[in-house]
């Protein structure tokens, strides 16, 4: 028994009772409604059904079940998946739709059958593969996708460059007396990986990291609405019409644009808009930008240095500012502001905007991932505060729904 505000609570009984029983009837109605819409092929019904189903699970499971799920299943399924990736197990399973025995899979992967059998049971229990009989399994959609390097590289990437920093967060936050991390040189990442180097310096040690990271970002973006898609940000109306842009004028400067994926996507979707597209990143990054449309110019530039292109129609940053605390963001933004042409230039910030209530789990997860390197995602109020502090005016925050990165359109104040 325990007492809370004078009320006696049987904690042992509470631990084995549904977490939010009063929510279950309404959630069941939502699932029924969204299920009918899904069958009728409503565009948003799948996501709404998924979120309602997740909420129902949280309401139905007991606190005891939730504790075991967090403490046992998530870390162990991750370990099993990463081991399976290293064994090339998913590729073997994906060769055809036929069920395969543990003995067959062990021969193909050169793993000991008894070990592989244990891993396979857990992978099946966690929905990663399908169990078709005793010691017999076949692929599903997830495991088939995990047979492809572009998708499965996320697991060794996270282990090598993120996970130990995230696991060190509790120790780090306790040591800094639970102050919000704001320094890229004093981080949980450094504590977890036992290094004095900052995250980005550490990442550059292994060439494979850059490839796996860019692959993972392409997977993250796959199937999500992009700001240049029809119905998201009105490109013609906001960037082109009335601007008098000539072919020799710079339409868009992608600052910190990596290998140019965003500009390539923009050019595919808007092939006829006038003006030059310029990709900027560090020399060691842009040297690997290959196969871009000839209309995309590549320029080595560090955004902590003055912006060399003056008076562009738009300066664009995708997931740049979330890498840095406010004081360093101010330095980046100051270089943009000094290059912008009054009443003409725009700054387009493509970032997550955390909802003030009902925040989406992907965004809050990413916030804690960024916390371990001393930065983070921002709410709408935090974005306004940061951008207005440097002499910018937020014209509008454009978004396509929960879990989708927004486009923050800014002009000089």
Image: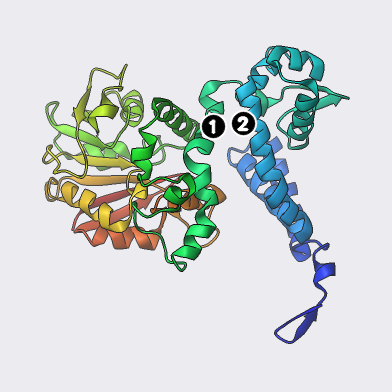
Q: Nearer the viewer, residue 64 or 250?
A: 64
Q: Is residue 206 above or below residue 21?
A: above
Of all residues, the one furthest to the right in this rendering is: 134
- Comparing 10 with 336, the one in front is 10
Q: Earlier in the sequence, mark 1 or mark 2?
A: 2
Tell me the quadrant of the picture where the C terminus can be found: bottom left
Residue where numbered disc 2 is placed: 82
The residue at the point 53 percent across, 37 percent down is: 159
Give the residue at mark 1.
156
Quarter residue 325 falls in: bottom left
**261 above or below 329?**
above
Note whether 238 is above or below 180 in the view shown.
above
Viewer-closest of 32 and 379: 379
Q: Point out residue 117 in the picture as x, y percentages from the top left corner.
A: 79, 26
Residue at image coords 52%, 45%:
164
Q: Are marks 1 and 2 in contact (CB under 8 Å)?
A: yes
Is residue 153 positioned above or below 384 on the image? above
Dot 2: few (<14), some (14–19), or many (≥20) neighbours within 10 Å? Answer: many
Say whether residue 62 is visible.
no
């Amino acid at each position: 028994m325990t007492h809370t505000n004078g009320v006696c609570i049987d904690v042992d009984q509470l631990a084995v009772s549904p977490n939010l029983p009063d929510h279950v009837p309404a959630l069941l109605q939502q699932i029924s409604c969204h299920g009918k819409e899904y069958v009728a092929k409503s565009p948003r019904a799948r996501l709404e059904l998924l979120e309602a189903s997740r909420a129902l699970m949280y309401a139905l499971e007991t606190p005891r079940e939730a504790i075991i799920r967090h403490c046992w299943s998530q870390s162990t399924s991750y370990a099993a998946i990463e081991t399976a990736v290293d064994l090339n197990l998913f590729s073997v399973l994906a060769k055809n739709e036929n069920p395969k025995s543990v003995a067959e899979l062990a021969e193909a992967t050169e793993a000991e059958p008894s070990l592989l059998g244990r891993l396979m049971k857990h992978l099946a229990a966690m929905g990663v593969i399908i169990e078709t009989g005793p010691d017999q399994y076949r692929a599903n959609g997830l495991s088939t996708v995990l047979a492809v390097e572009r998708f499965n590289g996320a697991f060794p990437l996270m282990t090598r460059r993120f996970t130990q920093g995230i696991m060190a967060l509790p120790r780090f936050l306790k040591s800094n007396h639970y102050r919000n991390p704001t320094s890229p040189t004093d981080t949980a990442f450094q504590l977890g990986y036992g290094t004095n180097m900052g995250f980005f310096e550490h990442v550059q040690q292994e060439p494979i990291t850059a490839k796996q990271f860019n692959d993972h970002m392409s997977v993250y973006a796959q199937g999500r609405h992009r700001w240049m898609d029809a119905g998201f940000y009105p490109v013609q109306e906001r960037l082109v019409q009335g601007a008098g842009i000539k072919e020799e004028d710079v339409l868009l400067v992608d600052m910190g644009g990596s290998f140019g994926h965003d500009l390539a996507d923009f050019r595919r979707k808007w092939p006829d808009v006038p003006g030059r597209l310029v990709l900027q990143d560090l020399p060691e990054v842009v040297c690997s930008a290959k196969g871009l449309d000839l209309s995309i110019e590549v320029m080595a530039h560090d955004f902590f240095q003055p912006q060399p292109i003056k008076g562009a129609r738009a300066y664009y940053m995708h997931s740049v500012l979330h890498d840095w605390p406010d004081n360093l963001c101010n330095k980046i933004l100051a270089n943009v502001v000094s290059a912008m042409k009054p009443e003409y230039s725009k700054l387009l910030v493509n970032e997550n905007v955390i909802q003030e209530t009902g925040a989406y789990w992907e965004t809050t997860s990413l916030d804690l991932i960024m916390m371990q390197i001393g930065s983070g995602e921002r709410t709408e109020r935090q974005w306004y505060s940061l951008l207005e502090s440097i002499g910018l005016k937020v014209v509008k925050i454009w978004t396509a729904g929960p879990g989708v990165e927004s486009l923050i359109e800014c002009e000089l104040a």
